[in-house]
Image (cartoon, rainbow, N blue to C red):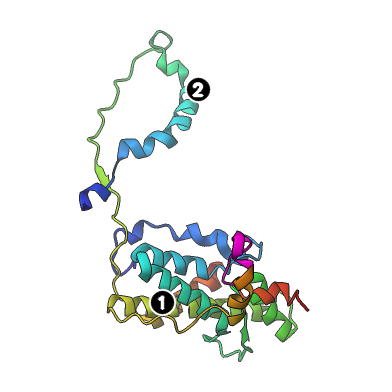
């Protein structure tokens, strides 16, 4: 069933893995800010935005016919620039 | 597709393919022009259609005299790789011209080849979209079947590349 194939990736889930190590660094660098007794004034935490749900595209994607000559030129130009 | 369709194709960073140049950062492995073409097929086709198109692309590549696309009019000689390996493909060309790897002709050749692969792939995908896919025009070399008749037994070997390109004829 199509719905079973569709996985959903929330922004929170997506960022969780990458954010873990970065969060560790951030915590290490700003530990003073996390200790209210060591700061002059507590900063209110920002209100989190609602999690947008990003649907993972269902494979296979839909192909739309392209101009072979245009693809030829584009590929050549890309190679000569970065190849 | 990113320009014509937009999402989700515009979410694929093409820089992700840069590591495949020179047969994966100079390893001389698979030609870097083939990888994004294979990916493009793989992302829009599944099952038998996908396998047929990728087989067609690989077999066409080994049989085709490159470069076809020569916009600068350098009149470069064409060479047939008989392999999907960058090392084999580009070395045959450099030997034909007796030029080093950093020669401008070599870069022009690989640029033209990249264009050829893109054009062939798009044309094939267009046929796929029109439900007019006609594969099987290009096939592995006949010698593959001869070698694999024995060597594929007991899982000794597998592959569709032209065996003799690297192995010669070890039975002589």
Q: Is residue B15 left or right of residue B157?
A: left
Pointer 2 local density, CA inside 10 Å: few below 14, some 14–19, many at least 20 = few
Q: Quadrant of residue B82?
A: bottom right
Name the image quarter holding the C terminus of chain A: bottom right
| Rendered residue at 51%/80% (across/down) | B139
Q: Is residue B4 left or right of residue B149?
A: left
Q: Quadrant of residue A45?
A: top left
Residue situated in front as seen by the camera: B163 or B130: B163
Q: Position of residue B58 (x, y in %)?
A: 51, 74
Dominant SS of magenta comes to loop
What separation in Å lies between label 1 and label 2 (alpha carbons)? 49 Å
Q: Sequence-wise, which precedes: disc 1 or disc 2?
A: 2
Please say if B4 is above or below B154: below
Residue situated in front as seen by the camera: B101 or B33: B33
Q: Position of residue B65 (x, y in %)?
A: 58, 86
* Residue named by callout 1: A71
Of all residues, the one furthest to the top in this rendering is A37
Residue interval drawn in magenta: B151-161
| Rendered residue at 53%/71% (across/down) | A79
| Rendered residue at 78%/79% (across/down) | B172
* Residue named by callout 2: A28
- Disc 2: which chain? A
Q: Is residue B102 visible?
A: no
Instruction: Confirm whether the magenta stretch covers residue B121.
Output: no
Please say if A74 is above or below B42: below
Instruction: Confirm whether the magenta stretch covers residue B159.
Output: yes
Q: Quadrant of residue A35?
A: top left
């Amino acid at each position: 069933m199509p719905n079973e194939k569709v996985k959903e990736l929330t922004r929170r889930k997506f960022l969780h893995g990458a954010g873990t190590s970065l969060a560790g660094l951030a915590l290490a660098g700003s530990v003073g800010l996390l200790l209210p007794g060591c700061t002059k004034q507590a900063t209110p935490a920002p209100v989190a935005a609602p999690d947008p749900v990003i649907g993972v595209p269902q494979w296979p994607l839909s192909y739309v016919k392209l101009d072979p000559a245009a693809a030829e030129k584009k590929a050549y130009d890309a190679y000569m620039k970065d190849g | 597709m990113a320009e014509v369709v937009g999402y989700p194709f515009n979410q694929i960073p093409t820089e992700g393919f840069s590591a495949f140049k020179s047969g994966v950062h100079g390893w001389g492995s698979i030609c870097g022009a083939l990888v994004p073409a294979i990916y493009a097929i793989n992302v829009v086709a599944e099952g038998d259609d996908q396998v047929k198109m990728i087989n067609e692309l690989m077999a066409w590549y080994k049989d085709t005299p490159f470069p076809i696309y020569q916009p600068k009019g350098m009149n470069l000689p064409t060479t047939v790789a008989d392999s999907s390996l960058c090392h084999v493909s580009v070395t045959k060309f450099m030997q034909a011209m007796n030029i080093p790897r950093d020669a401008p002709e070599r870069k022009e050749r690989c640029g033209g080849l990249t264009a050829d692969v893109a054009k062939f792939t798009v044309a094939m995908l267009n046929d796929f979209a029109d439900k007019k896919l006609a594969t099987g025009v290009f096939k592995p070399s006949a010698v593959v079947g001869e070698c694999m008749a024995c060597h594929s037994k007991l899982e000794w070997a597998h592959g569709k590349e032209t065996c003799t390109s690297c192995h010669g004829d070890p039975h002589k």
